[in-house]
Image (tube, helix red, strand yellow):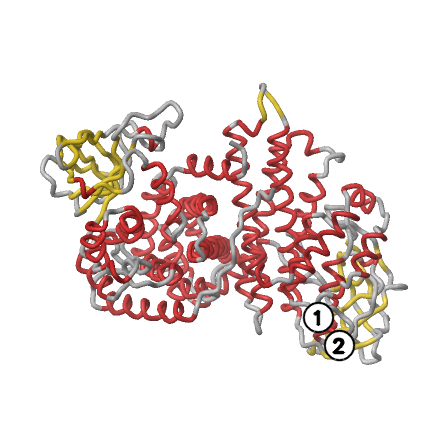
Amino acid sequence: MNDKTDHIIVDTATRIFQDLCEPNTVNEAEQGVWPKALWNALEESGLTLTWVPEELGGAGAALADGFAVLRAAGRFAAPVPLAETLMAGWLLTRAGISVPGGPLTVAPVHADGRIMLTADGTLSGRARRVPFARNAGHIAVLARRGTEAVVALVAATGLPISQSMSLAGEPRDDVSFDGASPEAVRPGAVDQDLLVCLGAAVRLQQMAGALEKILEQSVQYALDRSQFGRPIAKFQAVQHNLAMLAGEVAAASATADAAAEACARPEIAIGEIAIAKVRGGEAAGNGAAIAHQVHGAMGFTYEHSLHHATRRLWSWREEFGNEAVWAARLGRMVAERGADELWPFITAGS
Amino acid sequence: MSFSFRFDPVELPPEAKELREEVRGFLREEIEAGTFSPYGGKGSFSREFSRKVGAKGWIGMTWPEKYGGHDRSHLERYVVTEEMLAARAPTRAHSTADRQSGPVILRYGQEEIKQKILPQIARGELCFCIGLSEPNSGSDVFAASTRATKTDGGWLVNGRKIWTSNAHQADYMIALLRTSPPTKENRRHGLTQFLVDMKTPRITTRPIINLTGSHDFNEVVFDDAFLPDSHLIGEVDMAWKQATDELAYERSGPDRWIETFPALVELVRLAGEDPSERLAEGIGREVAHLATLRRMSLSVAGMLQAGKTPAVEAAVVKDLGTNFEQALPDKVRLLAPQIGDSQPDSNDDRFEEALRYATLIAPKLTIQGGTREVLRGIIARGLGLR
């Protein structure tokens, strides 16, 4: 996957994050300051439309490119709805709806969200903890008309929004769609499962990026911090912790790659997404715990930026199905196939 | 500086996929013919089976044809290896030679030895063991003191190797022997690799029974045993360079995460089509670990194929993989009570046997071929911590 990605796109994104997404930007965003310069730079470079084809005004880049950009965004804890805008673009494009400019988000993101398109053409229903809803110009909604899945584009302004926050201090708002008139509605070539799979793959990229970041921070901290007359990196107990962290980061990276590949197939392999989200979610928890242990009290302060990544890891692993949800589903898939099909199931992807 | 290790994704080529089907077909036939049982833990040594595998062209697959090899890719070799292991095929008579000893001879052996030995390995006719550990040299490999002293036309060997798996059945050993004292600058200096014919007079092999009750490892005593000059492998005193290369080869192969897999398979069998939520979740978690490890392990094979030496990545996979396979029997044990009232039958026996075997071998998994502590030291060095 990495070899196939367009390096220019990733380099562009990384440069923007380096210049405009400093730790202070992340802290200010948590206080409710919209990182305008960062968002504008992303939008002007076309990165926000990575997954929108050229004929619909987008960049028409490969799925893999968007995933690579999101990994970089995860490294920098970019406090903007880039992932959500990409997902909305993907969802709208699938339904053939042209994609508006500005920050976007998607709904529902949780399994209990149920939004209906009623006979009079308005929507009804609520979606819980929608990422960045208060910042979004539009929301791409996956709704139902009877039993049929439809995609609706809804202007976010004027929707009743009840504000809330993720563990990372990012907006996660409850949105009521009752009586909202969509700007466009099309039968969706997407069902809820597909959106959840894409969402899981997206979060896995962000998690892999954040884990890479905390490994780097932890190694550097261990080399810099001296106790008992030498850098703590010289203590075997610390070395072994960091070696385990490196293992978790490697596993998370592998799961992110696997999920991205699964999304690029003609039909998303749900089993591969399940495998990835279970192991990636575990890696997020295990990795964050080790990074904090290495950083000691310093990493528990608001001042140190470690929590930009770790709090996001704790938040992202919960979205689009946590480890328990996906593990149970995976276990049922395995049980249905039976014991003798377990090995063929594991080797099916490659 | 980037601290993250790279695991390049791999897409298996079509020929590897065809090969997988071919291997599965072969194994099915062998199981039906009663050559081996995919459920048993024991009886994994069969010269007859190894010769059949050799005849198929599945030993020494990546070696050049002129040494009896088959010029195939590391990825094809990987597929054969994992299929054999997943089916619990009895590969012990050839697996060490195929994985470790053959590649060392190919790389550092003298021409005469390469021509003589490698084709026999590839035909599945030779079993190898590895003479590395000694009573006072375990994880500290370079503390080896079994001595090879130069004599007319060869070397005289004195000392003891220990924990040597398969020594009692092996035709040859590749031994790490002391030819000079270490130097002040390099404590790894002074060791040399040799090919040892196990039928050489004045070599005695004594069994050491392990806690499962099996005879796997041994003590091997050398008492003025003579090795001809032609059996010298690589440079005198310089084994430390060769040994590290060798370890990079197969540290991360499927055998580093699949050993206790049958316990999971049998749990799935007993769980049936409609397991409880907790049982499904427990199974799902282990499958997720296993599949991710396999992906990483395959990635290392892909990097080897691309001519890279992913030594640290291999250590990462082995550390994660052996921890997983060691923990698995306990996870399975605690999920087992979730299974409803199944009637006692042969499935139960199979499950019990798989779990018993997995539980008993678990302790060795994070010791053999480089302990967890050694591996984490290698990874820490890769991170720039030492």
Residue B238 shows in the view: yes
Q: Give coordinates of residue B36: x percent, y percent.
A: 23, 60
Q: Earlier in the sequence, mark 2 or mark 1?
A: 2
Location of residue A23 with respect to B151 vertically, above or below: below
Q: Is residue A161 left or right of residue B373?
A: right
Location of residue A57 with respect to B312 vertically, above or below: below
As helix, strand or loop, the secondary structure at mark 1 comes to loop
Question: CB atoms at circles 2 and 1 under 8 Å apart?
Answer: yes
In the current view of this chain or complex, which residue is farthest to the right?
A158
Location of residue A33 with respect to A202 vertically, above or below: above
Q: Amino acid at mark 1?
A: Gly
Q: Which residue is mark 1?
A: A60
Q: Give coordinates of residue A41: x percent, y percent.
A: 81, 56
Badge 1, how many Cα within 10 Å: few under 14, some, many 20+?
A: some
As helix, strand or loop, the secondary structure at mark 2 comes to helix
Residue in view at x 55 percent, y 68 percent: A269
Label 2 chain ID = A
To which quarter of the image does residue A301 belong?
top right
Q: Is residue B93 left or right of residue A176?
A: left
Q: Amino acid at mark 2?
A: Glu
To which quarter of the image does residue A198 belong?
bottom right
- Please determine if labels 2 and 1 lie on a single subunit: yes
Q: Is residue A230 left or right of residue A33?
A: left
Label 1 chain ID = A
Relative to the observer, which residue lies in front, B303 or B129? Answer: B303
Residue in view at x 68 percent, y 57 percent: A10
Indicate which disc residue A55 carries.
2
